[in-house]
Each structure stands twice: as C-alpha cells, then as structure tokens.
Amino acid sequence: MSNSSQKVPARIVDLSEQSGWLFARKLLLIVGIAASALALWRLSDVLLLAFGSILLALVLRGLAGIISERTKISEGLAVAAVVIVMTSAFVAFAWLFGSQIATQFELLSESLPQGLSKIVLDLRATRWGAWMFLRAQEVNLTSATRQVMGGLCDSGLRGNEGVIFRYGLHVAKFSNCGPVSA
C-alpha cells in the first residue's frame, strides 16, 4: 500500500483552553477600557482644574522669564511681580467694568427667556417642531436659563477659579524650568 492512497485524518485541535483565555483577555481589556473611561469622566473636573493650573503657571513663568531677563532680578521676584500686576489688572478691570457687565448679564437673563419662548412658538408652528415638543415637554427652558445666567453673574474667586489660581501660582513658583529660549 502506498501512502498516497491512504487518507490521513485531519488533526482535531482542542481550542477550549485557548479560547477561554482569549475570551478572558478580551473581556479584561473591555472592562479596563470602560473603567478608564469612567474614571476620566468622573475626574474630568479635576483634570480640567489641573490643565488650567498648568496653563496659568506657564503664563506666569513665561512673563516672569521675560521680566527676569530684561531687569536682571531673580525669577521668584519676577513671578511675584507678574502675579501682582495681573491681579491688579483683574481688580481694575472688575472695578471699572464690573457693574456694566453685571447689568448686561441681568438684561440678558431677562430677555433670553422671552427670546427662547418666541423660538419655541415658531418651532411649534412646524410639523416636526410640534413632534419634537411632544416628546420633550418636561424640559423647562425658563428655569434652566435662570440657573445658567445666575451662575454666570456670580463673580469672585470662590470656586474653581481660586483653585486654578492657587495651584498655577504654586507650579510657577516651584518649577525649576528656566525661560524658554527662542
């Protein structure tokens, strides 16, 4: 008998162990990605504060480096001078234009609900607008705009702005990097 006439049965490979391990790896990868996405979403405020602080520190250090090069004073004193000048400019701007800005926001908070009501009436006149409003009747645009405008009209360094300012100042004060040379 020759080997060519005999058929060799195909080798059956048991992939149950490998398939189980592959499934577990894929499942762990998906769970890890989902957990990372959830952590980023939950920490988005903290990440935004960190980004703002670093951005402020870069501005402070950049301006302090320019002042330090031109006046030959230490960078620590230059950072202090930049902070004093920027804070004074902010206070002066708020003192000069704060009442006008608050008045404009107050007018906007009064006229915005009326404008939104007009838009709603115009949309309800269309067929697709009426369909859309049938499905979204629980939304109260007037109270939503009051909350948004009320939040915008509040001023001061009470919340996140204060955190950004403090940590930006801290990073600018204690970073060891010199000025960026062109």
Image: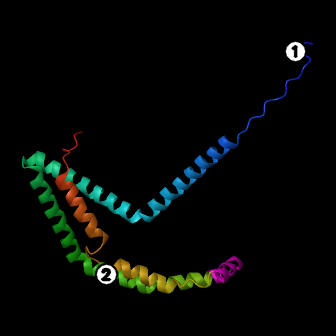
Residue at image mark 2: 102
The crowd level at tag 2 (other Cα within 10 Å; few <14, some 14-19, many 20+) is some
Quadrant that contains the C terminus: top left
Residue 51 coordinates in the image, percent (x, y)? 34, 58
Residue at image mark 1: 3
Q: Residue at x 18, y 46 (%)?
A: 176
Dominant SS of magenta comes to helix
Quadrant that contains the N terminus: top right
* Amino acid tagged 1: Asn
- The furthest residue to the front: 1
Circle 1 SS class:
loop
Magenta region: which residues? 123-135
Tell me how far mark 1 sits from mark 2, CA to CA. 96 Å
Q: Residue at x 22, y 43 (%)?
A: 180
User: Is 42 on the left-hand or right-hand side of 85?
Assistant: right
On the image, which quarter does residue 79 sit in? Answer: bottom left
* Amino acid tagged 2: Ala
User: Is 104 on the left-hand or right-hand side of 120?
Assistant: left
Q: Is residue 28 magenta?
A: no
User: Is 83 on the left-hand or right-hand side of 153?
Assistant: left
Disc 1 to disc 2: CB gap under 8 Å: no
Circle 2 SS class:
helix
Q: Residue at x 48, y 56 (%)?
A: 36
Residue 96 coordinates in the image, percent (x, y)? 21, 76
Q: Residue at x 85, y 28 (%)?
A: 9
The crowd level at tag 1 (other Cα within 10 Å; few <14, some 14-19, many 20+) is few
